[in-house]
């Protein structure tokens, strides 16, 4: 199984870190986890396209995680997708998808009539709204969802991708919670969000109260090391950086106080091969 980080930022705009999205590839299957801003460009750079996707998994419906969903759908059609798109999302996803498709309906119909392509099957969207549990099971891969703590968001989930001898876990957006530790137990790779509170100050429209509110539904860097240790994670990959610009050294030092395994600062288009336990990023390649 291979996992590529497509976007490692949060709602904050960054030229280096795009919106939250990740690609999971295993055998001939490929899955997109979240559709943050810029994910179709990153998909292409990762050697994939929306045409190839077998399913899209949404952790929750915060805009930073779903803003490019329509872009995935329309660009997949332009990439010659000729089959329906399957989307697994929490409660509310069906209405969100219906409204999104409705918003673009007139433009889409005019485009379909004008472009005269051979298929419009890519616009058939099969939505599966899920609660926690198994979502997909094939002979060599199982995906399941677990609830996380992202209140006031009611339905927020993390995902476990399991292949024989390989376990990959995405935290989604969450504060510390037992359900994550339980689901991530003995993961080979834990891809976890991180809130670097030392990096945020009340400037511009941002207030101290607002920073506190945001950090209350994320995981502080000071808490993440012990979470990875409790989960006995084989490797911790940091993702969804709030803020997207930070000093990596003190961040690693903070995490190192409570976690002794490999810690990787996730970067857009970094790929982790779970079989060979190898990380690839630009010209770099190293085994753990
Ligand atoms: Zn987010
Ligand atoms: Zn969120």
Image (spheres, rainbow, N blue to C red):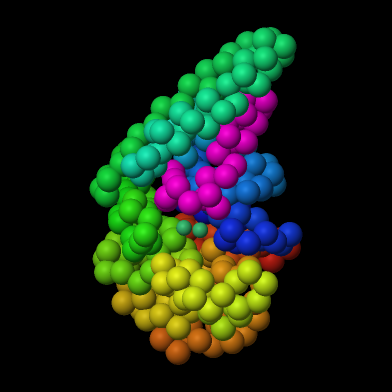
Nearest the camera: 236 or 88?
88
Q: Residue 111, position in %: x, y?
A: 68, 17
Q: Is residue 248 placed above or below 112 in the rendered structure?
A: below
Q: Residue 168, position in %: x, y?
A: 41, 58
Give the left or right position of residue 133, taking residue 198 as reference. left
Q: Is residue 230 visible?
A: yes
For residue 205, which quarter of the picture?
bottom right
Residue in the image at 47% along x and 40% along y: 56
Q: Residue 233, position in %: x, y?
A: 38, 71
Q: Is residue 279 placed above or below 128 in the rendered structure?
A: below
Nearest the camera: 158 or 212?
212
For residue 112, which quarter of the picture?
top right
Residue in the image at 33% along x and 53% along y: 154
Residue in the image at 38% along x and 56% along y: 153
Q: Residue 192, position in %: x, y?
A: 46, 66
Residue in the image at 63% along x and 62% along y: 12
Q: Is residue 262 visible?
A: no
User: How many numbered discs?
Assistant: 0
- Magenta stretch holds residue 50: no
Q: Main secondary structure of the magenta part?
A: helix
Q: Which residues are magenta?
A: 57-79
Give the left or right position of residue 91, taking residue 25 as reference. left
- Magenta stretch holds residue 70: yes
Nearest the camera: 5 or 116?
116
């Amino acid at each position: 199984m291979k996992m590529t980080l497509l976007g490692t930022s949060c709602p904050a705009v960054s030229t280096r870190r795009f919106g939250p999205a990740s690609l999971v590839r295993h055998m001939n299957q490929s899955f997109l986890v979240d559709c943050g801003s810029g994910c179709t460009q990153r998909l292409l750079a990762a050697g994939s396209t929306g045409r190839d996707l077998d399913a899209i998994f949404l952790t929750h419906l915060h805009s930073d995680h779903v803003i490019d969903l329509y872009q995935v759908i329309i660009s997949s059609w332009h990439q010659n997708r000729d089959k329906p798109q399957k989307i697994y999302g929490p409660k509310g996803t069906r209405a969100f998808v219906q409204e999104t498709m409705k918003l673009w309906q007139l433009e889409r119909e005019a485009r379909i009539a004008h472009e005269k392509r051979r298929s419009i099957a890519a616009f058939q969207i099969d939505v599966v709204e899920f609660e926690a549990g198994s979502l997909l099971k094939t002979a060599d891969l199982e995906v399941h969802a677990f609830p996380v703590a992202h209140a006031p968001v009611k339905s927020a989930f993390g995902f476990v991708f399991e292949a024989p001898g390989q376990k990959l876990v995405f935290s989604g957006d969450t504060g510390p919670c037992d359900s994550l530790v339980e689901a991530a137990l003995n993961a080979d790779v834990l891809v976890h969000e991180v809130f670097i509170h030392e990096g945020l100050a009340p400037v511009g429209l941002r207030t101290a109260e607002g920073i506190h509110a945001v950090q209350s539904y994320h995981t502080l860097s000071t808490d993440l090391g012990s979470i990875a240790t409790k989960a006995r994670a084989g490797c911790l990959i940091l993702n969804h950086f709030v803020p997207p610009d930070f000093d990596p050294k003190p961040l690693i030092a903070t995490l190192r106080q409570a976690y002794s395994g490999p810690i990787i600062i996730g970067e857009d288009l970094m790929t982790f091969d779970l079989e060979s336990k190898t990380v690839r990023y630009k010209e770099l390649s190293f085994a753990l």
